[in-house]
Image: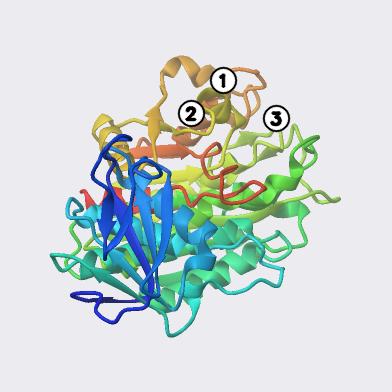
Amino acid sequence: MIKSKQIQNLDDYTGTILIPVFETYEKSIIPIEYHLASVSSKVFYGKKDTHYIIEKFDCTHVFIGLGKETDYKSIKTIFRRIAAKQSAIFSQKVTLVVNEKFDGNHVEAAVAGLVLGTYNLGHYKKTEKHPFLHKDFVLQYIAQKDFKDAIEKGMKIANAQLETFNLVDLPPNKVNPKYLAHWATEAGKKYGFEVTVFGKDKSTEVGLHSFLSVGKGSANEPQFIIMEYQPKNAKKHIGLVGKGITFDTGGLNIKTAGMVQMKCDMAGAAAVLGSMQLIADLKLPYRVTAIVPACENSVDAHSFMPSDVIQSYAGHSIEIIDTDAEGRLILADGLSYLIKNYKPETVIDLATLTGSAVGTFGYECAALFSNNDELCKALQKSGDEIGERLWQLPLWDAYKSDIESEIADVKNYSGKPVAGAISAAKFLEFFTDEHKSWAHLDIAGVAFGDDEFAKTKHATGYGVHLITKFIENL
């Protein structure tokens, strides 16, 4: 983790100085000043998403516009932009001037943004290391208060999200089920949670039939990953499940478009893995049990077929209508196994589950389904605080007919071109054993997409901070 240090002044200082300022107004006669570096309002007055650079006293002064008002997500994005797109201005010495209006959350967001700005999508390209990543780098800060805890927390949040970026953005010939299992095992050793992994044989013995059916067509062995974080005197027990399809061809219902992006179909798993790292790193006083069913939905002579009837861990039979509706099949076993064997008080699953969620909300928020209004409100509140939005859709019994099968207990796909996210959620609900506090997050539109930080679609890290914030707020 990047080191930090509070300093009192800039006497004899040479390096980069980051100076966040709130917006004044365009015709202000009073220039914005710091460290005897002055900028006229004619060229810069703190407007959001603007910055101005002045070289003076062997220092690079970077005035960063915040706008008239700001929030957590805006600050995080602004500082990420500076770190990512202006890396050439950074020296081995960087000092953040904490604005007098900032509180701990503002500082946390700014530091998280700076660290996220070190991310480079070119994993297999020769690129220069960001100045922040040199081993001797220290982020200094000037403030009227001690913000050491906020800075450290911001770095931990960013580090967990960076890990999530890597897991989602690395190619599927690198990130396969065993890669995720290895990552979880090593993270558990480093951050302090226990990890158990079921391979194909153990999963068969346990009876994870629905999970195993999805991975039958792949040369890569499925891995059922169980993580347990158990601090002393834990206040509550939270269960998490993340969809871990490391690549999705669609199976025999093979995808006809967009397959190149299907390495992202394990973004729900990555969010859960990143959440476990962050929860343990922050030493939150809550017990968390997380399950990542990880497999590859591929095609060969052993692939499961449309019209197959398969079994599940819960003992329910499932008619397969579409092999491309596979995520819900592995989540069904993940949810059933978690609820039966660990009995968490609250259960949350995250999955890039349906294009229907994207069609409903675009790329602005995730679809939220729950049978518990209090849980819904808590998740939405936590999301709003950090800019990871959620909006609730119904789970009415009127949609139950969409998953009814004549030959089996349930079918995995309605076959209708409408309400796809809802029918998928109804399918998952069927496997929760009527748990009284369960939420399903369909993150298909927010986990992987386009933004200013790369030329191609890439990971957003959605869910890592959301889940952690939700647990913090309990």
* Labelled pair 2, 1 in contact (Cβ < 8 Å): yes
Q: Circle 2 sits on which residue?
A: 426
Q: Earlier in the sequence, mark 3 or mark 1?
A: 3
Q: Circle 3 sits on which residue?
A: 321
Q: Earlier in the sequence, mark 2 or mark 1?
A: 1
Identify which amino acid the numbered label 1 is placed on.
Asp
Q: Circle 1 sits on which residue?
A: 402
Residue 243 in sight in this render = no
What label does residue 174 carry, if any? none
Separation of disc 3 and disc 1 at Cα? 12 Å
Report the front residue among 119 and 238. Answer: 119
Q: From the top left corner, tell me how far across and down residue 280 is, in percent.
A: 33, 67
Locate residue 224 relative to residue 176 in the image: left or right.
left
**At 50% across and 69% down in the image, what residue appears?**
184
Q: From the top left corner, tell me how far across and down residue 137 is, in percent.
A: 41, 80
Identify which amino acid the numbered label 3 is placed on.
Ile
Disc 3 packing (10 Å; few <14; some 14–19; many ≥20): some
Locate residue 286 relative to residue 363 in the image: left or right.
left
**Residue occupying the far top of the picture:** 398
Report the front residue among 97 and 265. Answer: 97
Separation of disc 2 and disc 1 at Cα? 8 Å
**At 49% across and 20% down in the image, what residue appears?**
400
